[in-house]
C-alpha cells in the first residue's frame, strides 16, 4: 500500500472545477512532484492533502488512514515561508512542537538535530529579517521537518529565490530528501526543477492529470501535445503513423519509438530541438533558411524555416543567420 493515496478527488468552487477526478499514489520515501501552469489545480490538490481544504468528492489517505484536517503526519511549507519575524530562528523552528505539546528537552534536541542537517546551527539566535533568502528558506524547511511528518508538502518553495540560489537550493533539497528519507510532495510550475529533483512527476492542466511517470518518461515519451509543449521545447508536426515504429511527416518516413496507434492514423509528431542536426543543404531530410540565432550559454538556439514550419534547433555549433542549410 502506498503511503499517500489521493482517490478520485474533485474540488469545485461554485461552478468552477479546480481539480477534476485526480487519483495519485505516492510511495514512502518518494520525491513526487505536481507540475503544471498557473491555475492547473496543483496547489489546490496540495492544500487538500494538507487538510486546509475539504474535497468536494474523493478521499485522502495517509498510511491507510483517511484524513480530513491538518495533522502531525503532514508538514506544509508555504511559498512565502510564513516565518514569525518577532521570533528567533530557533524559536521559529520550535514553534510547531510547542503546539504539539512536545516536552521542552525533546524540543531542544530536535531543533539542534534538524539545524545540523540544514546548516543553521550558527543562526539559532538571529531574527529572520537578518537572514538571506536561502537561509530563510532553510528555516522554513527545518520548522516543517522538525514535526517528523510522514509526508512533507511544499508549495513552490524556491519561486522567490534568484536563479543561482534556486539552483543551489535544488541541490540542497535533493540531499536533504536522501538524508531524511521523508516522502516529499512538491508543487512547481518550473519544468527544469521538476525534471532534476523528482522520482515521479504528474503534469496537470485545467484540473486534470495529463501524464504521470518518471522524469525520463515525461520528457522522452509525452502522451499528448500539451505535455510535449510544456515539458521543455518541442517541434510538433502533423504526421501519419504508418505502422508501429514508423511515422510519416512532410513527405519523410522516419523510425520512431511508438506503438499501438494503429495503421495510417493522424498523429502529432514530437521532435526535440536537441535531436535535430544541421548539415549542408542537400544532404539532410529537408532544406531551410536560418532566421534566428541566439546564444544561450551552453548551446545556440536556432530557428529555421523549412517545409512550411518554423523549426527550433539546439546545437553547440554556430551558424550565421540567413544561412541556407
Image: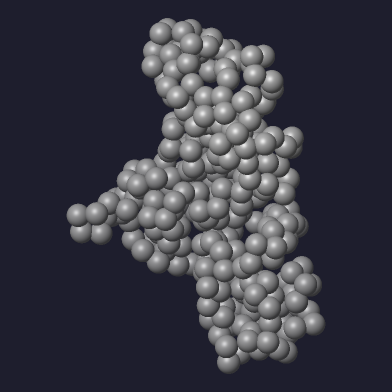
Check the image and name the residue furthest to the left.
15
Q: Is residue 94 above or below residue 246?
A: below
Q: Is residue 9 visible?
A: no
Q: Residue at x 42, y 7 (%)?
A: 263
Q: Residue at x 74, y 35 (%)?
A: 317
- Tell me the quarter of the image containing the N terminus: top right
Q: Is residue 204 visible?
A: yes
| Percent coordinates x, y for residue 57 in the rendering | 29, 50
Query: Would residue 73 appear left or right of 40 to someone viewing this image?
Result: right
Question: As rendered, which of 260 and 280 lies closer to the eye?
Answer: 280
Query: How many numbered marks does the figure carry?
Result: 0
- Tell me the quarter of the image containing the C terminus: top right
Q: Is residue 182 above or below residue 124?
A: above
| Percent coordinates x, y for residue 145 in the rendering | 64, 68
Question: As rendered, which of 66 and 324 lies closer to the eye?
Answer: 324
Colouring method of the image: one colour
Q: Residue at x 63, y 30 (%)?
A: 323
Question: As rendered, which of 141 and 317 lies closer to the eye?
Answer: 317
| Percent coordinates x, y for residue 202 in the rendering | 50, 43
Q: Residue at x 53, y 11 (%)?
A: 252
Check the image and name the residue furthest to the bottom.
86
Question: As rendered, which of 310 and 15 lies closer to the eye?
Answer: 310
Query: Would residue 324 appear left or right of 114 to someone viewing this image?
Result: left
| Percent coordinates x, y for residue 144 in the rendering | 60, 70
Q: Is residue 26 above or below residue 213?
A: below
Amino acid at each position: 500500500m502506498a503511503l499517500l493515496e489521493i482517490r478520485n478527488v474533485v474540488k469545485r468552487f461554485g461552478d468552477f472545477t479546480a481539480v477534476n477526478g485526480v487519483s495519485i499514489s505516492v510511495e514512502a520515501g518518494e520525491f513526487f512532484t505536481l507540475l503544471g501552469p498557473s491555475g492547473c489545480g496543483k496547489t489546490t490538490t496540495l492544500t487538500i492533502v494538507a487538510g486546509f481544504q475539504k474535497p468536494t468528492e474523493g478521499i485522502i489517505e495517509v498510511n491507510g488512514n483517511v484524513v480530513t484536517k491538518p495533522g502531525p503526519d503532514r508538514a506544509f511549507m508555504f511559498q512565502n515561508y510564513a516565518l514569525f519575524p518577532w521570533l528567533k530562528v530557533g524559536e521559529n523552528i520550535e514553534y510547531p512542537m510547542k503546539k504539539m505539546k512536545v516536552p521542552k528537552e525533546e524540543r531542544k534536541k530536535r531543533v539542534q538535530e534538524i539545524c545540523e542537517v540544514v546548516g543553521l546551527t550558527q543562526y539559532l539566535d538571529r531574527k529572520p529579517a537578518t537572514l538571506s533568502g536561502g537561509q530563510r528558506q532553510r528555516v522554513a524547511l527545518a520548522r516543517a521537518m522538525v514535526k517528523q511528518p510522514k509526508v512533507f508538502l511544499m508549495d513552490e518553495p524556491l519561486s522567490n529565490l534568484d536563479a543561482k540560489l534556486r539552483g543551489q537550493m535544488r541541490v540542497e533539497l535533493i540531499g536533504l530528501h536522501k538524508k531524511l528519507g521523508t516522502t516529499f510532495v512538491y508543487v512547481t510550475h518550473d519544468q527544469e526543477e521538476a525534471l532534476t529533483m523528482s522520482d515521479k512527476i504528474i503534469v496537470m492542466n485545467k484540473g486534470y492529470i495529463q501524464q504521470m511517470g518518471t522524469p525520463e518518461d515525461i520528457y522522452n515519451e509525452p502522451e499528448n501535445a500539451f505535455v510535449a509543449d510544456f515539458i521543455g521545447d518541442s517541434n510538433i508536426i502533423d504526421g501519419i503513423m504508418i505502422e508501429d515504429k514508423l511515422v510519416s511527416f512532410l513527405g519523410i518516413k522516419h523510425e520512431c519509438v511508438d506503438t499501438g496507434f494503429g495503421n495510417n492514423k493522424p498523429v502529432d509528431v514530437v521532435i526535440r530541438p536537441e535531436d535535430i542536426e544541421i548539415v549542408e543543404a542537400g544532404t539532410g531530410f529537408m532544406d531551410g533558411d536560418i532566421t534566428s540565432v541566439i546564444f544561450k550559454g551552453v548551446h545556440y538556439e536556432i530557428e529555421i524555416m523549412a517545409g512550411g514550419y518554423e523549426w527550433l534547433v539546439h546545437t553547440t555549433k554556430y551558424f550565421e543567420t540567413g544561412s541556407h542549410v
